[in-house]
Amino acid sequence: GRIDAGHGGGDTGAVGAAGVKEKTLTLKFALAFGRLVEQNCPDVKVIYTRKTDKFVELYKRAEIANENKADLFISIHINALPKGHTARGFQTYTLGKSRRTGKNNGVLENLEVAKRENAVIFQEKDYQKMYRGYDLNSLESDILLEFVQDKNMENSIELAKYMQKYVCQATRRQDMGAHQDNLAVLRLTSMPGCLIELGFISTRDEEQYMNTSLATDQYARGIFNAFM
């Protein structure tokens, strides 16, 4: 299994109202979930994208998973909205054609999540070479689906359903549903996987909750239950 803590180093990810950084929380949750797997599943090899605060390019995150022949890829992220918008809850993303739906009157347009999580590409050296043919604005292209076998997609969607069920159960977060979209890190991996958005760092009470040790335990347990 491959655990990917989103962002890191100069790429802080989203920053909350109280100054909490997405990169700090994603690492904390990734390590806590990984520990549970290591303690309870001795036959599972856990591979981490990063165990410290360092920058790892999206294509390298995928390469690490592919080269280690990982059976599963879980990328941990935290959501954010522009000022003036408030939302709460947990979402899962798998690779596929986006329906561009969102709850809360379109505040959670999938496109915004895809653009934010893919934007780090432009901080990377040689990004035009590494992501040739990858266009953030043409996310509906069927060519994407050539990158993932049907079986991987089926398994990814099943994993997403488990994530929504068990993480929401463990954390009592609002269920914001499983979605599909063109997320570079998922597109480049060759195994089932999902990207999870734990909550909204731009919403003060969710930011405060995610910054507690209780949340670390609850999210790690929920993700672990879905993994099992």
Image (cartoon, rainbow, N blue to C red):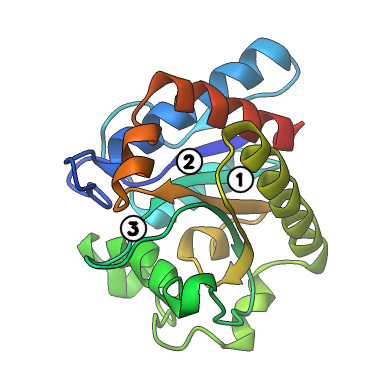
Q: Residue at x 50, y 83 (%)?
A: 139
> What residue would you read off at disc 1?
73
Question: Distance between the Cα atoms at labels 1 and 3?
Answer: 22 Å
Residue 126: image x %, image y %?
Answer: 25, 66
Q: Quadrant of the C terminus?
A: top right
- Tag 3 secondary structure: loop
Q: Is residue 50 visible?
A: no
- Tag 1 secondary structure: strand
Residue 80: mark in rendering: 3
Q: Residue at x 46, y 88 (%)?
A: 138
Question: Distance between the Cα atoms at labels 2 and 1?
Answer: 7 Å
Instruction: Find out whether the residues at labels 2 and 1 contact each other: C-beta distance under 8 Å.
Output: yes
The tag earlier along the polypeptide, 2 or 1, is 2
2 is higher (above) or lower (below) than 150:
above
Q: Is residue 219 visible?
A: yes
Neighbour tally class for label 3: few under 14, some 14-19, many 20 plus, Cα within 10 Å: many
Q: Nearer the viewer, residue 158 or 68?
A: 158
